[in-house]
């Protein structure tokens, strides 16, 4: 069968590999669609410290159960599913306090073990979620990015009436925007450097958009908030140099959600944090957010297909990677169609 395999940084190809089998406690999923994520690009470039090579990447995917391993109950062949990539031990301190997404022995499908850019993939049965009837497999492949949004918003603990500032109008920024709207936040500010992305943000419900290349964002937001600042700031740009600005823009008692994996240091002025009693939270992957996202998607409150700019077959993965590397302004979410 065919799979997209990364052998080492910058060494990748669509290859023929052996068909996997479903072990005890696992199901074999025939993948229909998989999304390319920024973290997949980090693996390809050698910027992911967690990956083990060689690796079949892909942690955003959906398909149909092809086979069920020993000891699996409640799953059936032919069932349409999406897959939570977070595999935790259930015994360590984070798992014990309900934070399995930062398990001490964490494994991520597509990073530590093979993922969805292959025709068939074996995954733990506990990680598959049945799809509501009217959610298509293409939309279901994008449940995982929305769980990232749900997780960071949960970590920031929104209050009714809170303003939200989203830095970055890429795919994660847009999932945060849609999720925030679904959760009832009414005033959402989006900042980016690409006007087309900002127009897309407006179409998805952003109330204010600013281009940081052509506008003084701090001045605009200070005026908009009458000098108070913003209670919620989600860093979907993941640029370490932006942290000082986030500290200045945060309101007293504000919460800042950080999503980036950069190893570059950020300047942090302790006075800004202390005088406003700010909360900075990291957010990694998702903490059991798949049911919540599926419910919102089924109710029509999330529109995942609005994020999709390209649909390509698996054999064109190298071309998709080249586009994302050299012409990122052309793409939003790139979906890879693997099966039918």
Image (tube, rainbow, N blue to C red):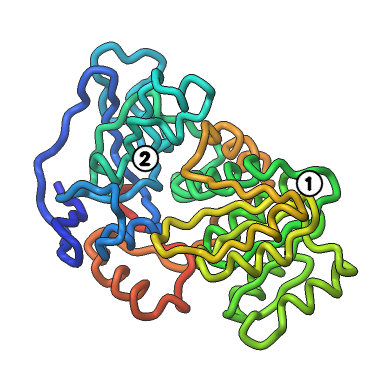
Is residue 306 shown to the viewer in this render? Answer: no
The answer to whether residue 157 is visible is yes
Mark before the other along the chain sequence, 2 or 1: 2
Residue beneath the point at 37% across and 50% down: 33
Residue 123 coordinates in the image, percent (x, y): 30, 31
> Which of label 2 and label 1 is nearer to you?
1
Which residue is the site of mark 1?
184
Q: Is residue 236 left or right of residue 94?
A: right
The residue most toward the bottom is 214
Residue farthest to the front, as pictured: 271
Distance, label 2 to label 1, CA atoms, is 31 Å
Choose top left, top right, bottom left or bottom right for residue 18. Answer: top left
Question: What is the quadrant of residue 209 in the picture?
Answer: bottom right
Q: Is residue 64 above or below residue 145?
A: above
SS assignment at label 2: strand
Q: Is residue 274 above or below residue 84?
A: below
Number of the label disc, if any, that sits on residue 63:
2
């Amino acid at each position: 069968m065919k799979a997209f395999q990364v052998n080492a940084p910058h060494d990748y190809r669509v290859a023929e590999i052996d068909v996997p089998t479903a072990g005890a406690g696992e199901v074999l999923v025939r993948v229909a669609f998989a999304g390319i994520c920024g973290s997949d690009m980090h693996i390809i470039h050698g910027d992911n410290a967690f990956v083990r090579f060689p690796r079949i990447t892909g942690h955003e995917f959906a398909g149909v159960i092809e086979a069920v391993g020993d000891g699996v109950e409640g799953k059936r062949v032919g069932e349409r599913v999406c897959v939570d990539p977070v595999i935790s031990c259930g015994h360590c301190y984070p798992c014990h306090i309900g934070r399995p997404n930062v398990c001490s022995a964490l494994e991520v499908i597509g990073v530590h073990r093979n993922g969805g850019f292959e025709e068939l993939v074996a995954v733990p049965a506990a990680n598959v979620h049945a799809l509501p009837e009217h959610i298509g497999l293409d939309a279901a492949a994008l449940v995982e990015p929305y769980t990232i949004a749900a997780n960071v918003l949960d970590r920031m603990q929104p209050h009714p009436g809170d303003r939200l500032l989203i830095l970055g109008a890429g795919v994660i920024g847009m999932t945060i925007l849609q999720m925030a709207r679904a959760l009832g936040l009414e005033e959402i500010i989006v900042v980016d450097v690409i006007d087309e992305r900002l127009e897309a943000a407006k179409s998805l419900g952003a109330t204010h958009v600013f281009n940081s290349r052509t506008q003084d964002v701090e001045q605009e937001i200070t005026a908009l908030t009458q000098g108070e600042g913003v209670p919620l700031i989600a860093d979907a740009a993941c640029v370490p140099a932006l942290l000082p600005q986030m500290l200045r823009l945060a309101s007293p008692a504000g919460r800042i959600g950080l999503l980036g994996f950069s190893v570059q240091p950020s300047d942090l002025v302790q006075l800004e944090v202390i005088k406003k009693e700010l909360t900075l939270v990291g957010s990694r992957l998702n903490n059991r957010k798949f049911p919540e996202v599926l419910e919102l998607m089924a109710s029509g409150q999330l529109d995942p297909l609005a994020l999709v700019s390209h649909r390509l077959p698996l054999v064109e993965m190298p071309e998709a990677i080249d586009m994302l590397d050299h012409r990122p302004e052309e793409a939003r979410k790139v979906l890879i169609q693997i099966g039918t």
